[in-house]
Image (cartoon, rainbow, N blue to C red):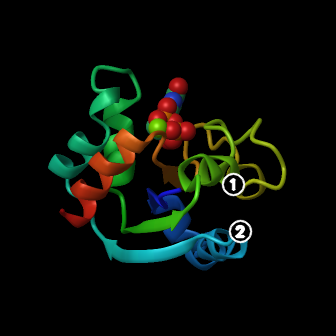
Amino acid sequence: MSTEKTLILVKPDGVRRQLVGEVISRIENKGYVITAMQMMQADRALLERHYTEHQGKPFFEPLVEFMMSGPIVAIVAEGNRVIEGFRSLAGVTDPTVAAPGTIRGDLARDQGTKVVQNIVHGSDSQESAAREIEIFFGK
Ligand code: IDP
Ligand code: MG
């Protein structure tokens, strides 16, 4: 079986709240291996590429603004079925209903903002992972 890779982002809310270590711990405690990581300030062009599937949706502009509101940490994690596994660790998109025990369920809540602030991003398929890793880390 070939080992899979996923792109994880600690979003600006996670960095502001000093949850980078907490997110890394959950990835590593699960047994996935971090093979690349960088803290960075994302610009509009990069985020429009990353979130291209959401262009035209009402939360798209608030999402881009939020993701530019402070530094993020981009991480590549590896392991068998890591794409599905990290999505499971993260919990569902809406932190109000994300299961306790998940990153979003334990660490985030509704802040009444136009965009849901939910600590982390994780790729949702092998195609997305390959595309997103190239956006953040190059080939
Ligand atoms: P995901 O991060 O769980 O994969 P996506 O549907 O890909 O969720 O949406 C990307 C991000 O956009 C979410 O993590 C969240 O921050 C924000 N978002 C998604 N849907 C909504 C919405 O209906 N209202 C506000 N923000 C949303
Ligand atoms: Mg998504």
Camera-side residue: 11 or 90?
90
What quarter of the picture does the C terminus occupy? bottom left
Residue at 71% x, 75% y is 29
**Residue 4 image position (x, y, % from top left):** 47, 57
Disc 2 marks a residue whose amino acid type is Lys
Quote the CA–CA distance across marks 1 and 2: 9 Å
- How many dots with numbers? 2
| In the displayed structure image, the side of residue 136 where residue 102 appears, left or right | right
Q: Quadrant of residue 111?
A: top right
Residue 61, percent across and down?
A: 31, 34
Q: x, y percentage for residue 100?
A: 84, 50
| Mark 1, secondary structure of its residue | helix
- The one nearer the camera, 131 or 122, is 131
Whether 16 is drawn above or below 44: the answer is below
Residue at far right of view: 100
- Residue at the image position 60 percent from the left and 46 percent from the top: 84
Position above or below: 59 against 30: above
Q: Mark 2 points at which residue?
A: 30
Instruction: Say left or right for 52 vs 107.
Output: left
Please name which of the two marks, 1 or 2, marks the residue nearer to the observer: 2
Query: Closer to the camera, 109 or 3?
Result: 3
Sequence-wise, the earlier of marks 1 and 2 is: 2
Q: In this view, does 5 lie above or below 56?
A: below
Q: Where is residue 7 in the image (x, y as percent from the top left)?
A: 42, 57
Mark 1, residue position = 89
Q: What residue type is labelled 1?
A: Leu
